[in-house]
């Protein structure tokens, strides 16, 4: 009879523990996928839920947006340039049932899929596109991931490429290319300036040719500008046409005016 109280005590403790395991509390951002004898029963939560011990089991799922860092990937661009790229992915679970039943580990599956998708998408573009069209690449990767993870109950909200790392030789080549491009732009701008200046000079010459007195005024203005420079010697060409406009003829004999 001495063992009977211990048996009663043991039974009581087991019953209390079973009763305590029946009650679960899920936060607002959590859901519980409940299985009844191994078969899917329903999704419960948030709040207080009751489980039948030994018959029902529950898997907790977090519905908050998760941030996953994609490890650095070695990518060869379409123009055969080797780069190292890493990214970050924002996603969340929208269907807890599929996230538990249709995939073993949705976090690991999403991580591996994001790595392969990153290499596949970037490998179809040239280096210049990776550097200048990053927003479009982010959108393409996000769209592909969202379609493929939809069967797992995952919604990929955003993808951001963080770094595109190049080796030193490629950085120097890009610097030389940028310098050559700037030199080309400078030459084009200089040529356009010369063209515009020649057009304006042509218009000015046409205007002055209509009034010969305007040429004399222009010569006088030029002399005034030169005189204001405090120069000791002034060399100024004097065309013969100016004498014709002033009605002055060269003297005969020694050829002096």
Image: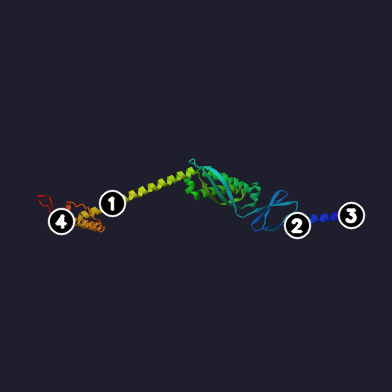
Residue 193 drawn at (x, y percent): 32, 51
For discs 4 and 3, the disc positioned in front in the rendered view: 4
Q: Residue furthest top?
A: 80
- Where's the N terminus, which quadrant? bottom right
Residue linked to disc 2: 20
Compute the Cα span from label 2 to label 4.
121 Å
Residue linked to disc 1: 199
In this rendering, would 161 be left or right of 230? right
Residue linked to disc 4: 246
Residue at 19% in and 55% down: 212
Q: Residues within 10 Å of mark 1 (few under 14, many from 20)?
A: few
Disc 4 secondary structure class: helix
Q: Earlier in the sequence, mark 2 or mark 4?
A: 2
Q: Earlier in the sequence, mark 1 or mark 4?
A: 1
Disc 1 secondary structure class: helix
Residue linked to disc 3: 2
For the residues bearing labels 1 and 4, Cβ distance under 8 angstroms? no
For the residues bearing labels 2 and 3, Cβ distance under 8 angstroms? no
Residue 76 drawn at (x, y percent): 52, 41
For the residues bearing labels 4 and 3, Cβ distance under 8 angstroms? no
Q: Earlier in the sequence, mark 4 or mark 3?
A: 3
Compute the Cα span from label 1 to label 4.
30 Å
Residue at 75% in and 57% down: 20
Disc 3 secondary structure class: loop
Q: Residues within 10 Å of mark 3 (few under 14, many from 20)?
A: few
Residue at 65% in and 53% down: 61
Compute the Cα span from label 3 to label 1.
121 Å
Residue 126 seen: no
């Amino acid at each position: 009879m001495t063992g009977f109280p211990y048996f009663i005590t043991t039974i009581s403790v087991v019953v209390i523990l079973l009763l305590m395991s029946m009650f679960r509390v899920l936060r607002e951002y959590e859901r519980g996928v409940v299985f009844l004898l191994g078969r899917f029963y329903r999704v419960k939560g948030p709040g207080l839920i009751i489980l039948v011990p030994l018959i029902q089991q529950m898997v907790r799922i977090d519905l908050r947006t998760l941030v996953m860092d994609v490890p650095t990937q070695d990518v060869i661009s379409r123009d055969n340039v080797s780069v190292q790229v890493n990214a970050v992915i924002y996603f969340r679970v929208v269907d807890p049932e599929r996230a538990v039943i249709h995939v073993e580990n949705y976090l690991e599956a999403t991580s591996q899929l994001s790595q392969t998708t990153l290499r596949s998408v970037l490998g179809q573009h040239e280096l210049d596109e990776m550097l200048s069209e990053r927003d479009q690449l982010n959108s393409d990767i996000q769209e592909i991931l969202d379609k493929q993870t939809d069967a797992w109950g995952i919604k990929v909200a955003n993808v951001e490429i963080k770094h595109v790392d190049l080796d030193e030789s490629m950085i120097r080549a890009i610097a030389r290319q940028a310098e050559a491009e700037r030199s080309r732009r400078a030459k084009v701008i200089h040529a356009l300036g010369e063209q515009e200046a020649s057009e304006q000079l042509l218009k000015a010459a046409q205007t002055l040719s209509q009034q010969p007195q305007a040429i004399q005024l222009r010569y006088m203005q030029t002399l005034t500008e030169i005189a204001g420079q405090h120069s000791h010697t002034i060399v100024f060409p004097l065309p013969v046409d100016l004498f014709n406009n002033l009605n002055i003829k060269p003297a005969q004999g020694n050829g002096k005016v």
